[in-house]
Amino acid sequence: MPSRLLSRIQKIPQPGSDAIISSQTSSDFPDCAVARFVGAVTDANLEAVAQSFDAILSESIHYLVVDFSTIEDIGPAGIGLMLVLRQRLRDRHGDIILCAMRPRLERMQRVLGLEGYFTTAPDSQSALQSLKNVFDGIYPLSVRCPACDTLIDIEHPGRGRCQTCEAVITAFPDGAITLG
Ligand SMILES: [Zn+2]
């Protein structure tokens, strides 16, 4: 069954070196966005690129797949931005997955001492598939309610109530839970 895709395209105006970032979320995986670059990320347009990612990373997004297959170039500052996004997503119990990295990019990661730092995938399809495999293993989640200690079942990540004491519980995609 084809999933409904919601697409957004953001053009980053920058004379001489346009970069375009498009993002896509799928209705069967609403907390994951796939972002694609066209063009180059340079020191000159870094701020605009960062703002585009701010727009993509709405509250509900926990996972961001960044597809580098059509990017022309990205400098160390762009990799620095990926690090910032990685931290933001991990603070939300999510992650950033970089895919279709070119040899030059992989070399740059090594030079910057970032080898193994990012979650990577050969392409965006396999990134989504491996995320789905993880969730299939985690949910439905069977945990003890942090408020009343009874065993409860949580079907999906998100906010809900304990069936016993009605405490509000937030479940994260990685299986972590918190009160409130
Ligand atoms: Zn409870």
Image (tube, helix red, strand yellow):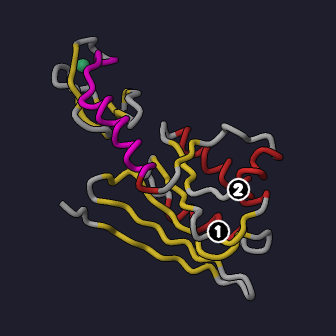
Residue 69: x %, y % from top left = 57, 65
The yes-or-no answer for disc 1 within 8 Å of ligand 1 is no
Q: Is residue 60 visible?
A: no
- Residue drawn at point x = 16 percent, y = 20 percent: 164
In the image shown, does 117 or 64 lie closer to the viewer? 117
**For residue 177, side relative to residue 71 (left or right):** left
Residue 136: x %, y % from top left = 29, 35
Which residue bears the numbered disc 2?
A: 103
Sequence-first tag of 1 and 2: 1
Which residue bears the numbered disc 1?
A: 49
The yes-or-no answer for disc 2 within 8 Å of ligand 1 is no
- Residue drawn at point x = 32 percent, y = 38 percent: 157
Give neighbour class at mark 2: few <14, some 14-19, many 20+ (Cα, 10 Å).
Answer: few
**For residue 48, side relative to residue 178 (left or right):** right
In the image shown, does 172 or 75 lie closer to the viewer? 75
Quadrant in which residue 160 is drawn: top left
- Residue drawn at point x = 48 percent, y = 36 percent: 93
In the image shown, does 100 or 131 lie closer to the viewer? 100
In the image shown, does 116 or 30 lie closer to the viewer? 116
Q: Locate ligand 1 by image quadrant.
A: top left
Quadrant in which residue 20 is drawn: bottom right
Q: Amino acid at mark 1?
A: Val
Q: Is residue 166 above or below residue 73?
A: above
Q: CA distance from mark 1 to mark 2?
A: 22 Å
Residue 26: x %, y % from top left = 32, 60
Which mark is nearer the camera, 1 or 2? 2
* Label 1 residue SS: helix
What residue occupies the far front of the structure in this picture? 103
What residue occupies the far right of the structure in this picture? 111
Q: Is residue 90 above or below residue 153?
A: below
Magenta range:
126-146
Q: Quadrant of the N terminus?
A: bottom left
